[in-house]
Image (cartoon, coloured by chain):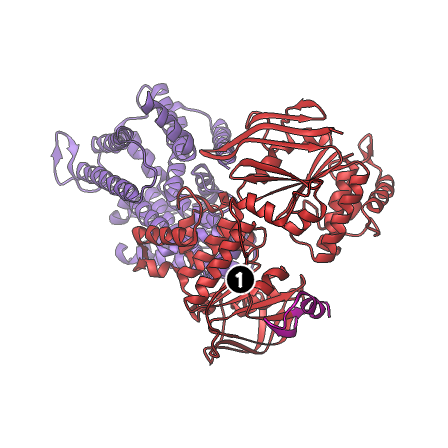
Chain colours: A purple, B red
Amino acid sequence: MKLLKEAKALLKHNIRDYGMYIALLVIMLIFTILTDGLFMSSRNISNLIDSSGYIAVLAVGVMLVIVIRHIDLSIGFLAGFLGAIAAILLVQFNLPVFLVIPIILILGMLAGSVTGFLVAKVGIPAFVATLAGWLIYRGALLQATERSGTINVNNEAFNAIGNGYIPSISQVGGLHLLSLMIGAAAILYYIYSMIKNRKNKIKYSFDVVSNPLFIIQLVLVSSLIGYVTWILAGYNGFSWTMIIILIVLVVYHFITTKTVLGRHIYAVGSNPEAAHLSGINVSKITFIVFGSMGMLSALSGILFTSRLQSATTTAGTLFELDAIAAAFVGGVSAAGGVGKVTGAVIGAVVMATLVNGMNLLGVGIASQYMIRGGVLALAVIFDVMTRRQRA
Amino acid sequence: MNDTILEMKGISKEFTGVKALSNVNFQVERGEIHCLVGENGAGKSTLMKVLSGVYPYGEYSGDIYFDGQVQQFNKISDSVDIGIVIIYQELALFPDLSIYENIFIGNELQRKGVLNWNEAITKSKELLEKVNLHINPETLIKEIGVGKQQLVEIAKALSKRVKLLILDEPTAALNDTDSANLLNLLKELKKQGITSIMISHKLNEVIAIADKATVLRDGETICTLDATRGEITEAAIIKNMVGREIEDIYPKRNHPVTDHRLLELKNWSAYDGHLGRNVAEHIDLHVNYGEIVGIAGLMGAGRTELALSIFGNSKKYKTSGELFVDGQPIQLKHTSDAIKSGIAYVTEDRKGDGLFLLQDIKNNISISNLKDLSAYGVVNDNEEIRTAEEYRKSLGIKTPSIEQKVGNLSGGNQQKVSIGKWLFVGPKLLILDEPTRGIDVGAKLEIYTVMNKLIESGMSIIMISSELGEVLGMSDRVYVMAKGEIKGELSSNEASQEKIMELATQ
């Protein structure tokens, strides 16, 4: 009974963080029931993750932009444009993949820095500066694909990024071995870091949850990771897209939670004046965040082009709004200073799940948009309510 | 004549685990001026928020009787409807609207949805007369000073047929003349039968106007003092507020001032691009090691602007002239340059541009010196916690945990966090801008003690303050500023209230 009470209190206190995971599980459960289990099939989950990749990386970037109280509308067409450049470099210039990818990422970073310069140094509102970028990159995309129309990419290594899977080494009982190993490593690392964290907190006599609840937490999350791994291992294993999302997730999570840079970003977001008076170079932080946004746009462009195995004239249309929606579903605050990388990724997965599930059910595109809009509104309403409750 | 207008019985209120009020009783007679005093965090503001319906019925326990009736407010307008009006320290006026628009906002004079501006202007004139403000009601709020704005707030309250007026530190931002005006007005309103509750940290004001004074400490009612029985004295209030006797609120320090120059400004000017004028002009000033230098002056004299220009705020001010630290000329392009040369600035506006309210104490203390806590850009969490704990203990920050959000702390504790943040940077010169604004006596004493400790540890301090008592009590030397210039320099022996005011009003 005491345990239940504690669990309730914990849930109440962290409702914003847990709410998102619970919502995702509920949505998945509903789709699983409605589709007689088709939704949870290995093939579909694998597909879902691959199709959410290019929005997830954008969502991570734009989450940080929103944290420092700006916005970036140019990212969709920037992704589309850089994807087209990647295709041109591969097809028309016959450059190898290992050169094309860094070139595109650097181009993205440069493009982001230009936005950063306009916003931080010239002082143009981000909305206007990036609206200009939206128009310019859209034009640039059209120009790049003007002569040839859709550019088909037939480079296998490049196309594997959006469609291929990591090698299995060997199959164990029909399951993908390397994926199982990665999953197991993730679980072990999770348990290790949670225990270490808990020990530390106890050492400084901070509040921690009781032992049984802690173990339940560990078991729950571990089995969730285990379950997803098991599902994916039953099909083709982890896709390259998923590995890329995981890398972005881990790197950005680390930067935002463990580094000086991360602290400075959140400081600028929660009070720019105080940050300036604390000796933080606000312009520099703005530069870095927009630079990272540009780089992630480039990555998104690569993922999308690779997935379609071609660069189209309309690639990137509305990506920016999908990414912003994902960031808000993931709990970023429009007032700045609050937002998590894990939240942004989960937000993207929630939105992709909705699309995927509704497609399986054959819901019409008109209803799909309205339902997605409703979920976005609900998420933000929920966010505002829970914040008010705690204030 | 026992005519109780307000009685609050057994009020308790909790914030997630912290008891803000426990079983508070508070009784106000009709037509009196009742002061509510207590240290920061004693529960004064919380009690008034319960009374005005900010915390609706059900979020607290206990009963409120107003005019003999039990009241259950669900929202703020419920309390306004029966004549309880609260005026907050941060005024709720719209700077770009005129006085009469502000007075009738939310309470517009209208017929079938069409506003009657003429009537509003006429009525505003009457109301302004009542608060002794002889000024055209069409003037914009931003064009009048804080003192007059405060009067407009009271006029606005009068327009709502107020019976009980609650003022939360009304004179905190006012100069002496405006404060005196305001207090006189309260006395006049009293004659007209309006009851007032005033929260104040300025004990001389409490002594001057209170009929009764209720002291809160740690969320409990300690006592109610009665002026007719001669109970309202400084000693009695302080004793009840802090729970012990305080001999001298400006503690002595035994540390010699050296001749060694730490900071020197020569012909220093700061130009504000937005205002298009110099906010500080031809400043010659120096600070020696081991010295507390006070900068006195009225609001708008350019003291904060001078401090910000010394702190390398080149974004806002273009500076000319020379600045020496330890005899070396220094160029400041950014606040980080000032920090590197050993200058730190604790802002007068803690909440506005000092602290990260949504972040915890730990993050606020470490933010300016993360490099000492990190290797290759990665923050060492353990070191950070250790550091924050160290400052929590040494500065006496009262909090259940350093993971507490700074926004939830009382003013005095927030100020300690601000100071802790800069101590961790380890500057040579600490500029404190209004270090005790909005802070109660107990916390003030603690801040002064910290200042003395810093001096003894080899630091120097520039203290900007509007409180003359503090300037005189703490400074080794005083500069007086007016209109962006230094009008005079006084040693601690020469300095007196009269001399400072004479220079400040030049």
- Residue A213 location (% of width, % of height): 29, 29
**Count of numbered tags:** 1
- For the question of whether residue B142 can be seen, the reply is no
Which residue is painted at 50% across and 53% down in the image? B415
SS state under label 1: strand
- Residue B10 location (% of width, % of height): 57, 27
Please state which of residues A115 and B87 is positioned toward the viewer in this rendering: B87
Mark 1 sits on what residue?
Answer: B432
Q: Is residue A195 magenta?
A: no
- Residue A304 location (% of width, % of height): 36, 45
Q: Residue furthest front?
A: B229
Task: Name the chain letter of the residue that bears numbered label 1.
Answer: B
Please state which of residues A212 and B456 is positioned toward the viewer in this rendering: B456
Tag 1: Cα neighbours inside 10 Å, few (<14), some, or many (≥20)? Answer: many
- For the question of whether residue B423 can be seen, the reply is yes
Q: Quadrant of residue B294?
A: bottom right
Q: Amino acid at mark 1?
A: Leu
Q: Quadrant of residue A110?
A: bottom left
- Residue B9 location (% of width, % of height): 60, 27
Magenta stretch in the rendered image: B481-506
Which residue is painted at 49% across and 27% down in the image? A367
Image side of residue B367 versus residue B465, left or right: left
In this view, B107 is above or below A119: above
